Amino acid sequence: MSKGLKGLAVKALLMFSVVLVSACGAKDAGLNLTIIGEGSVTSPSGVDCSESCAATVKLSPPTIGNKLVEITATPAPGYTFLGWNNQYCTPDDVCDLKYTGLCADQLLCLTGFIYSGQRVEAVFVDSSLLVDSGWSELAVCAILGDGEVRCWSASQDEVEQVPALNNPQQVAVSDYAACALVDEGISCWGKPNFLPQEGPTVYPPLEMEMLGSEICVLDQEGVKCWSAYGTRETPEFVNPSNLRKRSVETPEFIGKEFCVDDEGAEVCW
């Protein structure tokens, strides 16, 4: 092998060693945690907060590409955990936060990866006051025993600006809007272009869920859905129950959808 080729081989080996050493070492990443109400958030990765805190998360090696960090919400006695405000979380008490790895040198990752921080809100409310609640990835709302509706949003102030409501009984939330069942029907607030149009008459008791600007209601007459763009067609049902929303990730579709149980089968749209 010529001296030139040997030199290139040595340089390539050194570059690979730098990447390998960087990848095999643990990395620190930031977590800005807001706790609303009474409860705590912990993680095997080094988080243990019973009030709002700025924590350092230990990312386990190899620290290449994206990393998931598990955090767990535990309500204090007499409190209920309502949900997280973070795009990677579900209403479950355990959330897998996604940390995105970026090349530190913005080119070949020869100097390793850096990880941007995460901001998370964990919402707990007094169980004795809780009447109903709704959740989305970026907002949480609750109806309390005195008829007050409170909303907490990670990015949409309009959702937190709850109007005066006449006897709110149920609430549903999307990332950008929220709706409540009141004596007059369905009342909504939030980002203007995400507010559903006036919908059909609904008959309590019912179930409600929201996705984007769309609201679906399951009442005595069946499933009714409408949005900022008008009424939406739904599948035909025999005996629908348990209206809910869920995340979907398939080769054909990534997003969220409404689902019900109908005659022993799950039907989604």
Image (cartoon, rainbow, N blue to C red):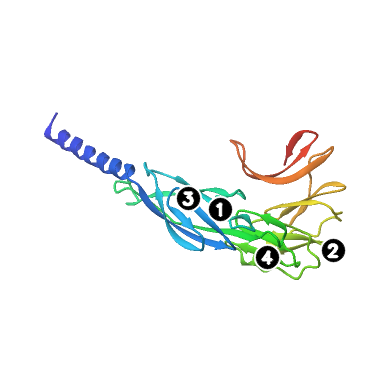
Residue that badge 1 annotates: 73
**What is the secondary structure assignment of the residue under circle 2?**
loop
Q: CA distance from mark 2 to mark 4?
A: 18 Å
Residue that badge 4 annotates: 150
Quarter of the figure with residue 165: bottom right
**Residue 176 visible:** no
Q: CA distance from mark 3 to mark 4?
A: 28 Å
- The label nearer to you, 3 versus 4, is 3
Residue that badge 2 annotates: 183
Q: Amino acid at mark 3?
A: Ser
Q: Residue at x 75, y 33 (%)?
A: 265
Location of residue 167 in the rendering, given as x and y in whole percent from the top left corner:
81, 65
Q: Are marks 2 and 4 in contact (CB under 8 Å)?
A: no
Residue that badge 3 annotates: 43
Residue farthest to the top, as pictured: 1
On screen, residue 182 versus residue 248, left or right, reads: right
On screen, residue 19 versus residue 198, left or right, reads: left
